[in-house]
Image: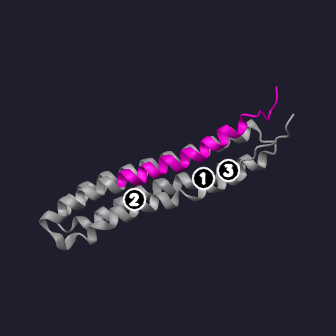
Amino acid sequence: MSTCPPYAPFFGFAGVASAMIFSTMGAAFGTSKAGIGIAGLGTFKPELIMKSLIPVVMSVRIRFACLPSPTQLARTVKYDGYPLFSGFIHLGAGLACGLTGLAAGYAIGIVGDSCVRAFVHEQRVFVSMVLILIFAEVLGLYGLIVALIMNTSADSGDIPCS
């Protein structure tokens, strides 16, 4: 049994794709959900629209926070002499980054929508909204850190192909 089968790069590139797809889906969901809240706020108090754009900006930042992981993973996946162990580690790293980006975008969207709608009635909600959005965004950054650590451990394995 070979430790470097020809299908091993599939798992590495599946990790790259999942990191990009899931983090983009999270950013898109967060942007759309917070945008719906901003549209509802704009009909009642248009002067608060600029302050209410923070959830949208933070949701887009999720996508850019998760961008280094798939690019780093894509650079380390090789076609020849690529161990199956590294393929599975890169798949796990991509899933860690992508799914935490999805969760962060989902959290930012839900919090952004509800807090922006509450912001119409009570302006003191703004500081709490920003704090909760920061905590939600950190989820995506944790996923990025885990993915980079996993990528480093996959490269340090250096399993020879037999």
Q: In this orientation, does residue 120 appear?
A: no
- The residue sitting at the top extreme is 1
Q: Quadrant of the C terminus?
A: top right
Which of the numbered marks, if any, corresponds to residue 59?
2
- Badge 3 element: helix
Q: Quadrant of residue 118?
A: bottom left
Q: Which residue is mark 1?
A: 70
Q: Is residue 50 left or right of residue 9?
A: left
Which of marks 3 and 2 precedes in the sequence? 2
Q: Quadrant of the N terminus?
A: top right
Name the spot of residue 29 as percent of width and height, x first: 36, 50
Which of marks 3 and 1 precedes in the sequence? 1
Q: Quadrant of residue 160?
A: top right
The magenta region covers 1-30
Q: Which residue is mark 3?
A: 151
Residue depicted at 73% across the width and 36% down the height? 84
Q: Quadrant of residue 36?
A: bottom left
Residue depicted at 76% across the width and 34% down the height? 6
Under mark 2, the amino acid is Ser
Q: In this orientation, does residue 137 appear?
A: yes
Callout 2–callout 3 Cβ contact below 8 Å: no
Name the spot of residue 63 as percent of width and height, x first: 48, 57
Which of marks 2 and 1 precedes in the sequence? 2
Q: Is residue 71 left or right of residue 57?
A: right
Residue depicted at 62% across the width and 56% down the height? 71
- Badge 1 element: helix
Marks 1 and 2, how far apart in space? 18 Å
Q: Considering depth in this image, is 57 or 10 the residue closer to the camera? A: 10
Under mark 3, the amino acid is Asn
Which of the numbered marks, if any, corresponds to residue 58?
none
The dominant secondary structure in magenta is: helix
